[in-house]
Amino acid sequence: MTTTRVNVPVAYLANLRGSVMSRCRPVVAKSAVGIALVMGSSGCITVKTPEKPIVIELNINIKTEVLYRLASDANQTIDKNAEIF
Amino acid sequence: MVHHARPTRLPIRTALWLAPVALMLVAPLPSFAQARDPVYAAARSAGQVGEKVDGYLGFVTPPAPDLRKTIEDINIKRRAVYADKAKGAGATIEEYALTSGCLLISHTTPGERYQAPDGSWQTRGAGMPIRDPRCP
């Protein structure tokens, strides 16, 4: 397994990076239990987006057999293009 | 009149003899065109640039602008070669590049830098480098 770090440009989230989103709605308690649970909270859901760039770890599974199959071809490619290797 | 034919034949013969000799001298020239860019070669020897696991070159230390450009150009060329060859081999660019990375790390000479599977930079010693267990 090869772990490759890929910076995914999630435009929407990137624009909101470091900001605080808050959404409030009137709390409607439908039962006595509901009232008890809601009491003490403001009824707001607050999401704070991270300051750091959003990184998604992608596990790219490349099998050993594939590497063995490509080895001789890759070796020739390296020899024929020595100026970039 | 004096015949000039005889003396003029000698230089032609000499030229005929020299032709293969000249070819032998010229023939190795294309191999010079295969040489690494001097900026890249110097940085590689100095351990500023190393072979990464993924088949591309990486910076061990922050590069100067000209070195950065040289290495990025080489990586773009490598990617183009990998893409072309991967297509021919029925593989993905990443598979072909990773295979090449295995081989390129093996090809490093003592003192050169390479990336170990954990992402750390290593200096090639006399023995085998630390490679991905899947490497051929």
Image: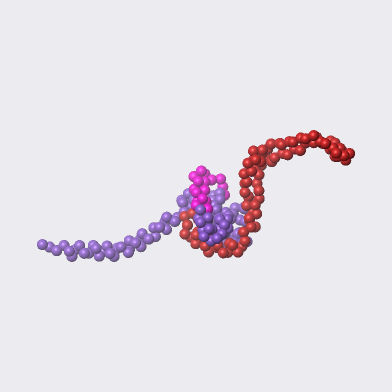
Chain colours: A red, B purple
Q: Position of residue B73 (x, y in %)?
A: 50, 49
Looking at the image, residue B16 lies above or below residue A6: below
Which of these two is toward me, B48 or B135? B135
B61 falls in the magenta region: yes
Please give the range of residues in magenta: B60-79
Q: Quadrant of the N terminus of chain A?
A: bottom right
Q: Determine the image quadrant of residue B35.
A: bottom left
Residue B2: name its quadrant.
Answer: bottom left
Q: Is residue B89 left or right of residue A12?
A: left
Residue A5 visible in the displayed image: yes
Secondary structure predominantly adopted by residues drawn in magenta: helix
**For residue B110, which quarter of the picture?**
bottom right
In this view, the residue farthest toward the right is: A32
Residue most extreme to the front: A30
Q: Nearer the viewer, residue B27 or B127?
A: B27
Residue B39 location (% of width, % of height):
48, 49
Seen at 32% across and 64% down, the residue is B20
Between A56 and B47, the one nearer to me in the picture? A56
> Horizontally, is B96 left or right of A28 in the view?
left
Q: Is residue B129 magenta?
A: no
* Residue A32 pos. (x, y %): 89, 39
**Which residue is painted at 21% across and 64% down in the image?**
B9
Residue at 66% x, 41% y: name it. A13
> How many numbered markers are drawn?
0
> Is any part of residue B105 visible from this angle?
no
Q: Position of residue B85 (x, y in %)?
A: 51, 58
